[in-house]
Image (cartoon, rainbow, N blue to C red):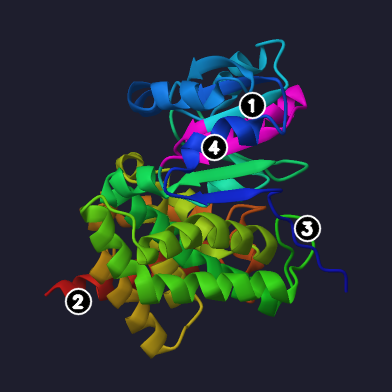
Amino acid sequence: MITTAIFPSRYVQGAGALNELGSELARLGKKVLLLQDPFVSEHFDAQIKQSLTGHLDSYQETFKGECCDEEISRLSAISGIDVVAGIGGGKTLDTAKAVAHALNVPVAVIPTIASTDAACSALSVIYTAQGEFDRYLVLPQNPNLVLVDSAIVAKAPVRLLIAGMGDALATWFEAESCRVSGAGNMTGRPGPMTAHGLAKLCFDTLIEYGVLAKSACEKGVSTPALERVIEANTLLSGLGFESGGLAAAHAIHNGLTVLEPTHAFWHGEKVAFGTLASLMLSDKDADLIDLVYSFCEDVGLPTTLADIGLTSVSDADLMKVAEASTAQGETIHNEPLKVAPVDVFNALKAADAYGCSRKI
């Protein structure tokens, strides 16, 4: 059996890392398209320009808010660029990767939050202009540079760090499902033991340091615990999902996006509930289920449908989620069991019921 793992070329993390952006980008080209989300433009523009001075020229654009075909086409029309850098949240980074692919140039991603594992992957999640999941864009290579300034991440809203933990929480469970079923990872081939080991390290790091990291982020300070969780959310989760594989949790997330009330919640928050539903779906050990629910409660991740905006959701709407989650080509079919819409419907109801019972 041939196994395959893929990784970003260079990963830089630490307090003050943004000051190294110019020297790091200079390895990749002479003129950079800087795609910045509005928050970055407002708060870090001067620091970024100072970092770039003397290293390379830049063309700056502000991200319009959705990683969709319209935004990718707009940015891909810019000429004279030999490297793209995305600075901001997950959708900004995914857009930068898609644009670099369209222009056939290197890409650097600089997350200012640790809310997803998008940074390290050779993947962009494409949505419609209205925010519904559309498709995965699988890219020919991983980012050439991932740079994370943990001092910036520490000062971001704590909800974003928690959402990143929700995204990372799925990593080991989905990689393990793929290992058992023999399903392919994002390369189409099974992942090696390295990928599965990193996925388990991701889970263990969250369980041990998640609450401590949340406390540090609440105070806006970088600590060893926060550094570990940033790395788990960004690097370990990225390597684990991409080289280990995706399964039920992310498919259920995609299904949940068909219901408009969930659009107000972060990717990782919906993935966290998808993970809880996947535990019910796959009949995990009761002690493990209890551990994961306790972790979610301790750090503030959703444990009920109401927690992701579905307070009075109808059975008919939940079945729409279940049907979307099990659509042809969805990663839920990487689970080591056959999954029908009714199975997801039942798992969603069970996960919600258990979460509600623990709030009493």
Is residue 226 rendered magenta in the image? no
Which image quadrant for residue 41? top left
| Residue toward you, 14 or 194 | 14
Which image quadrant for residue 279? bottom left
**Residue where numbered disc 2 is placed:** 358
Which secondary structure, mark 4? helix
**Residue where numbered disc 4 is placed:** 20
Which secondary structure, mark 1? strand
| Up/down of 1 relative to 237, above or below | below
The C terminus lies in which quarter of the figure?
bottom left
Give the mark nearer the N terminus: 1 vs 2.
1
Give the mark nearer the N terminus: 3 vs 1.
1
Q: Amino acid at mark 3?
A: Gly
| Residue toward you, 196 or 356 | 196
Q: CA distance from mark 3 to mark 2?
A: 39 Å
Q: CA distance from mark 4 to mark 2?
A: 46 Å
Q: Position of residue 131 (x, y in %)?
A: 44, 33
Q: Are marks 1 and 4 in contact (CB under 8 Å)?
A: no
**Residue where numbered disc 1 is placed:** 84
Give the mark nearer the N terminus: 1 vs 4.
4
Write the start and end of the magenta stretch as one range: 87-112
Give the mark nearer the N terminus: 4 vs 2.
4
Neighbor class of circle 4 (other Cα within 10 Å; few <14, some 14-19, many 20+) is: some
